[in-house]
Structure formats: structure tokens, C-alpha cells
Image: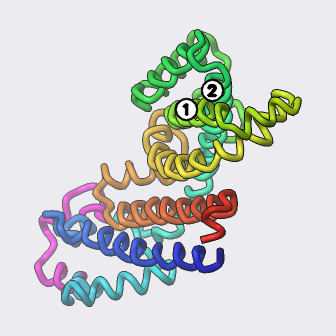
Amino acid sequence: MAGYALWRIGAAVPVLFGMVLVVFLLLNVLPVDPIQVMITQTGSGQAPSASATQETIDNIRRELGLDRPLHVQFLAYLGNALSGDLGSSFRSNQPVAEMIAEQYPYTIRLALAGLTATLVLGLTFGIIAGLWPGSLIDRLLVLVATLGIAAPTFWLGLMLIFAFSIVYPIFPVLGVGSLQAIFLPAITLGLPGAAIVARLTRSNLAAVMKEDYIVTARSKGVSGRLLVLRHAMPNVLAPVLTVIGLQFGNLMTGTVIVETVFSRPGIGRLGVDAILQSDYPVVQGFTLVMATTYVVVNLMVDLIHMWVDPRIRDQ
């Protein structure tokens, strides 16, 4: 068990290293001079990049270390990133790490709310459909799940706003401080993942309910609820956990759209604004944090999967 855990943690290290390398190269492959962008962004409404002398540009490039070889710049960026220094915004000159730290809790809160919606809806619908495979309710839930997977997130969010904030004003469109304010964004974010979890739970549960040990437990008089929760669900949840880990990464990336549609604060909206404003240090920091979160969450899911599945623990 300890060996598997150490192996998974060690395997995540080169992934994180490669991710930092890709994020670093994002700024260097763009056909835009970051010094020109920085001078323009920090100007006073005009276009000082056009009037800035070449000497000024060279001095700024030298101060930022952009005149050094690319591998030297990467090592410096890697060292700064490991110490929590992600540079400063071209637009506000505020440290990128501080900007992300201010917005990250909002995104995590939304992602966890979306994950809750994914689990509650996905497991509930999947269990109901799996217990009565082939029935009318099973076909209806499979149809709903298919539509949930196919529906674009931005369209789903707009439809929910129209239905439950305009036609029937039950939930507010704006706001971040209440459960009502986060309900529609959470459903928008979690419904596509819930459809995937529901279909996986349904197929696994329908297969597990035909296993010999389930038939034996039923013949011994084990009640339906106890039969499902104690005997069937542990074997159903193992593959579902893996999908949930992948879905959490999708939830984190999905917050970019949901935060924009619902005008919520968060690093997703921060990243979109940075892209529109060509604020490349913020784009780098946003991409790095999102990718790191994805890797860390999947590592945690693998370790939880190991704890749940005794076959992995015994390897």
C-alpha cells in the first residue's frame, strides 16, 4: 500500500514538471513582445509602446531577465514558481499569486458545489435506473443523462437563468454569499458530470445485482436497502471514484464558463479577463494553478481508490 502511494506521488512529479514547462513556453511562443504589451498596459490610456525608445525597451527586458537564454529563463521561472512567485500583472502590477489567492476560494467553492450536484444527481439517478434496468424510468433517465452530456454548459446556464431567475424568479442571477446564489451555477456545472456518473452507476449496478454473492445475500433474507448499500455499492463505487476524479478536473475547467455566464468571481473569470487584456503573467499563473489542481485531485482520487479497492492495496 505504501509502495503504491509513493509510486503514484513520484509519477506526479514529472507531470507537474512538464506542465510548468508548457506553461512557461506559452509566453515565449506567442508572436507578441511582452515588453510592448507591458508598456501599453501600464500606460495612461494612450499607446506609449509606439513612443517608447528602444533603449527603454532593452532596459526593461534586461531587468526582467528576458535577454537571457531560454533555458536560463525557464530555470529562473521554475525556481520562482516553486517559491510561490508567479510574477506580476502587466495591467495592475499586482503579484499574480496574490490575485489568484484572492479568487481561488470562490472557484473551489463553486467546484465543490458542482461536485456535490454531480454526486447527488448522478448516484441517485444511476441507482434508480440500475435497480430497474429496461423499465420506463430507466429509459427516461438514460435519455435525460444523454441530453445532459450533450448540452453545452453555457447554453444550460442561460436556460436555467431564463427559467428560474426570469420566468420563475426563484434563484438570483448574481451574488456569491448564499446557497440560493450558488444553486444554479452548481447545477449548471455539475449536470454534465452527473449524467456520466449516472450512466456508469446504472450499468455497473445492473451487472453487480446479477452476481452470485448478491443472489446468495438475497436468498438469506437481506433487505433491499441493505443489499444495495452494503453489498452492491462498494463494488459499484470503485470505478465511479475514478470518473469522479476526472470529472473534478472538468469541473475546474468548467468554472471558466460558469463564472463568466453568472458573473461570479473566481480564477476562471480572472483568466478570461487576462486573456482578453493580453495579461500574460496572469494567464500563465491561471493555467499553472488550474493544471496543478487537476493533477493533485487525480492523485488524491487514486489514493482513495487504493484505500477503497482491496485488490490495489494487496499489490
Q: Secondary structure at mark 2?
A: helix
What residue is rendered at 49% in x and 59% in y?
Answer: 294
Residue carrying label 1: 203
What percent of the width, then of the height, locates residue 209? 67, 32
Q: Are marks 2 and 1 in contact (CB under 8 Å)?
A: yes
Residue at mark 2 to residue at mark 1: CA–CA distance: 6 Å
Q: Measured from the top left, where is residue 72 in percent x and y?
A: 26, 90
Task: Examine the structure image and report whether residue 58 is included in the region drawn in magenta.
Answer: yes
Work out whether residue 173 or residue 215 is closer to the camera in this orientation and state it: 215
Q: Residue at x 64, y 42 (%)?
A: 236
Judge from the rendering whether residue 233 lies leftward or rightward of residue 266; answer left or right. right
Q: Position of residue 16 (x, y in %)?
A: 42, 73
- Is-magenta flag for residue 217? no
Q: Which residues are magenta?
A: 40-60
Which residue position holds label 2? 130
**Image: 302 above or below 203:** below
In the visual, does 9 lie left or right of 125?
Answer: left
Tell me: residue 54, above or below residue 223.
Answer: below
Q: Position of residue 28 (x, y in %)?
A: 21, 71
Q: Is residue 188 left or right of residue 14?
A: right
Residue situated in front as seen by the camera: 266 or 152? 152
Q: Quadrant of the C terminus?
A: bottom right
Circle 1: residue type: Ser
- Quadrant in which residue 304 is drawn: bottom right
